[in-house]
Amino acid sequence: MSRPASAWQGVVTNVARSRCLAAVGDNEVEFHVPGSMIRDNGGRNPVRVGDLVTLALRSGTLVLQRIEERTSEFQRTHSEQGRSPRAATIAANLAMAAFVLPATAERRHLRMLDRMLVGACWADIPALVCVNKWDLVTDPGNLRNRLRPYRDEGWPICYTIAPAGDGVSGLLDLLPPGLSAFIGPSGAGKTTLIRAITGRADLKTLGVNSHTGKGRHVTTAVSAYQVDADRWVVDAPGLKTFGVAQAPQEMVLAAFPEIERAAGSCRQRWCDHEDRGGCRVAADIRSGAISRERWASYRLLIAEAVG
Ligand SMILES: Nc1nc2c(ncn2[C@@H]2O[C@H](COP(=O)(O)OP(=O)(O)OP(=O)(O)O)[C@@H](O)[C@H]2O)c(=O)[nH]1
Ligand SMILES: [Zn+2]
């Protein structure tokens, strides 16, 4: 389809409540989303970072004309107060999801990792794990052990100290052409990593609150930054929760390949894995081939996902 001379194509780099930015050629331009498109989307801005958009110039303002069909949607289930849970897209057309955890990882961070991996399987995009703040790790052997199930299933894991740039070139080597989104809990160091990768000193981090020890919620909008000619990184606000209620159960299974494989070898086709005779999953849990943490996580997520 030909487009009028006054139309431009771009990739969305920033979505805030009232304005959006897109990279058009070598420029970043601001554009307006027509009220009708927001109304048609149930009162929400339909634009996401990563969207390929067509913009038209109207009375001196760039206006969104069309959002091209997405190749992938990285989404989670999200419930706002008093509303029923709905799927919310974090970014569109991603080539990679980079899950950032602090090396001070607590149990809840690893459980969030399982949830985010369901999100990557649901979006059908590859994922990697970046364990940042490696300078603060207290028991490195224990943490590496707890991450072994992920490594064994082929998810790349890298260890970084973002402010010093340690491990950052290894992380960069893992990013494919296109958009890679940095996702994880608040204060994990996503913005600091992106600053180290892009060399952009203007990216703001506010530091960790010295009283609570928690990272402050500093990144408020999803934004994309250019790394080199064909790679972009996406900084997303820190997540507190990552619901999978709208994800199909097969996507949960895909995020636990060690369990999926074992279940395929249970003697009963519809085995409930309650350790009756011939259950391979139960045998693998007993032998340690399936970690108890991952098994408990799987059971929660499979119950949460749609059947
Ligand atoms: N010791 C140490 N501190 C780090 C490291 N990486 C980041 N920090 C610090 O941790 C704090 C939070 O870092 P951010 O980059 O803002 O974290 P974020 O994940 O972007 O946080 P949100 O924007 O809230 O999601 C800042 O004070 C950083 O300087 C690291 O590898 N080691
Ligand atoms: Zn079984």
Image (cartoon, grey):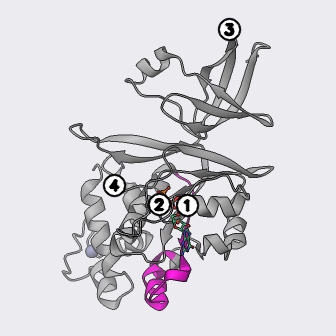
Q: Give the mark nearest the N terminus, 4 or 2.
A: 2
- Whether tag 2 and tag 3 are in contact, CB under 8 A, the answer is no
Q: How far apart are marks 1 and 3 (CA)?
A: 39 Å
Instruction: Classify 10 Å Cα crowding around label 4: few (below 14), some (14-19), many (20 and above).
Output: some
Residue of label 3: 59
Residue of label 4: 249
Residue of label 1: 190
Instruction: Classify 10 Å Cα crowding around label 1: few (below 14), some (14-19), many (20 and above).
Output: many
Q: In this view, does 187 lie to the left or right of 177?
A: left
Mark seen at residue 184: 2
Q: How far apart are marks 4 and 3 (CA)?
A: 49 Å
**Secondary element type, mark 4:** helix
Q: Nearer the viewer, mark 4 or mark 2?
A: 2
The amino acid type, in three-letter code, at marker 1 is Lys
Q: Position of residue 240 (x, y in %)?
A: 36, 56
State which image quarter holds ligand 2: bottom left
Q: Can residue 72 be seen in this view?
A: no
The residue stretch that appears in magenta: 124-150
- Whether tag 2 and tag 1 are in contact, CB under 8 A, the answer is yes
Q: Is 292 situated above or below 206?
A: below
Q: Nearer the viewer, mark 1 or mark 4?
A: 1
**Residue 2 in which image quadrant:** top right
Under 8 Å from ligand 2: the CB of mark 4? no
Q: Is residue 190 left or right of residue 195?
A: left
Q: Which of marks 2 and 1 is in front?
A: 1
